[in-house]
Image: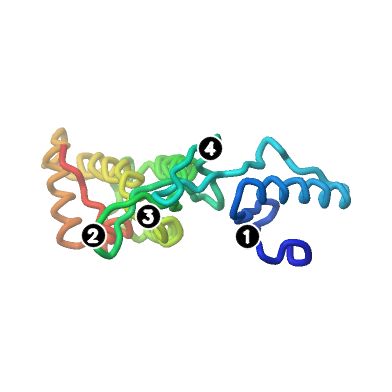
Amino acid sequence: MVRQNPAIPFERYADDAILHCRTRQEAERLREAIIVRLAACGLELNLQKTKIVYCKDDDRRGNHEHEKFTFLGYEFRPRRARNYRDKYFVSFLPAISDKAVKKIRQEVKGWKLHLRSDKTLDDLARMFNPVIRGWVQYYGRYYRSMLHPVFRPLDRTLVRWACRKYRKLRGHQRRAAHWLRRISVREPKRWAYWEIGVRVVVP
């Protein structure tokens, strides 16, 4: 890339790479050049995973077979954005990918917080905030609002935990949700995901 295509920006991580071309013709030419270069090194390009993606937005309104891609846990695709005049438009932006969302939810489910009635809310926060904060800092760098639905199941699990923990809340999920919501509003820094504006939803 440096020797033969210095004008084309690119990023690489391990064996994944993104190359920013100006036209489809340029992208097709570059793909063929990469195939030749890899073959010279005894390697082969995975054509099933290699795609030419059209970065669709308000300035590029055409259609293409591929209009999104994932890279490092982010999905890049057309999304609604707001400019400095508070007007909405479509831009090609990254946000946490569906695969990353599924992975986070599976890990949170494995914590089985609702069964840890021997712990206080502060105990649980100290145990799991470092992991949650890492997710927030990484995946919340772009389009942070997409993280809100990711952590909704965690709130529901904490409601179940409260129903097991406190006798006055047993069998009263709505009351427990109100109790947890008041804490999230009063002390948003207690849980790392509350800090980004996620609030407990009362059913």
- At label 2, counting other C-alpha atoms closer than 10 Å, the crowd grade (few under 14, some 14-19, many 20 or more) is few
**Which mark is nearer the camera, 2 or 1?**
2
Residue hosting label 1 = 11
Please give the name of the residue rendered at 48% of the width and 45% of the height, measured from the top-left corner: 100
Name the N-terminal-most of marks 2 and 1.
Answer: 1
Q: Which mark is residue 64?
A: 4
Task: Work out whether residue 132 or residue 48 is closer to the camera in this orientation and state it.
Answer: 48
- Assess disc 4: are there few (<14), some (14-19) or many (≥20) residues with their C-alpha within 10 Å of its C-alpha: few
Q: Amino acid at mark 4?
A: His
Is residue 192 found left or right of 134 in the rendered image?
left
Tell me the amino acid under the disc marked 1.
Answer: Glu
**Mark 2 near mark 4, Cβ–Cβ under 8 Å?**
no
Counting from the top left corner in percent of width and height, residue 154 is at 32, 45
Separation of marks 4 and 1 at Cα, in angstroms? 23 Å
State the separation of the CA atoms marked 1 and 3. Answer: 20 Å
Whether residue 105 can be seen here: yes
Examine the rendered structure and indicate whether residue 38 appears above or below residue 156. below
Identify which residue is drawn at 17% across, 44% down: 166
Q: Which residue is mark 2?
A: 86
> In the image, which is nearer the foreground, mark 3 or mark 2?
2
Mark 4 and mark 3 lie on one chain; the one further toward the N terminus is: 4
